[in-house]
Image (cartoon, helix red, strand yellow):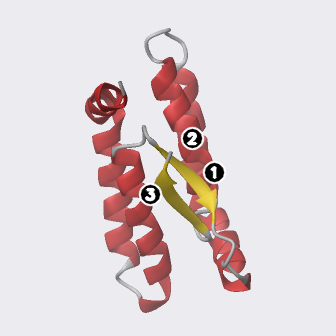
Amino acid sequence: MRTLLNILWLVFSGFWMALGYAIAGLVCFALVITIPFGVACFRIARYALWPFGYRVTDRHDAGLVSGLGNVIWLIFAGIWITLGHILAGLAFCVTVIGIPFGIAHFKLVPVSLMPLGREIVPA
């Protein structure tokens, strides 16, 4: 069932979201100081491409630098990306068939809001 949901997700939303995160990751690699954000973008892109069967957990070894990076991410990108996921999730939840995809968008909210200090693990 996860594979079927992932394939449908890929067609309806996942490919474009993963492409957007990957492009953002490439842009972040342009400057040395934003490379950690680029790595986080590529991690989120992989999760956005194939979200069913994975979950986001907090890394307990993340320190103060991750927290400061998350504040910078939140100000410049996190709020807007999170609002996009919330609006897309609500739009998908309008129909019964779209509810799993809306839930997948809601699963992307925590990692898109504050990506540093989180990891994506199999469910």
**Residue farthest to the top, as pictured:** 96
At mark 1, the secondary structure is helix
Residue located 54% across and 45% down the image: 108
How far is the residue under mark 3 from the one under mark 1? 11 Å
Per the rendering, the mark at residue 44 is: 3
Which residue matches tag 1? 110
- Image spot of residue 88 (x, y percent): 51, 31
Which residue matches tag 2? 107
- Image spot of residue 53 (x, y percent): 43, 40
Residue located 70% across and 71% down the image: 71
**Residue farthest to the bottom, as pictured:** 32
On screen, residue 47 versus residue 111, left or right, reads left
Res 51 → quadrant = top left
Determine whether 48 is above or below 73 in the image: above
How far is the residue under mark 3 from the one under mark 2? 11 Å
Per the rendering, the mark at residue 48 is: none
- Residue nearest the viewer, comparing 97 with 21: 97
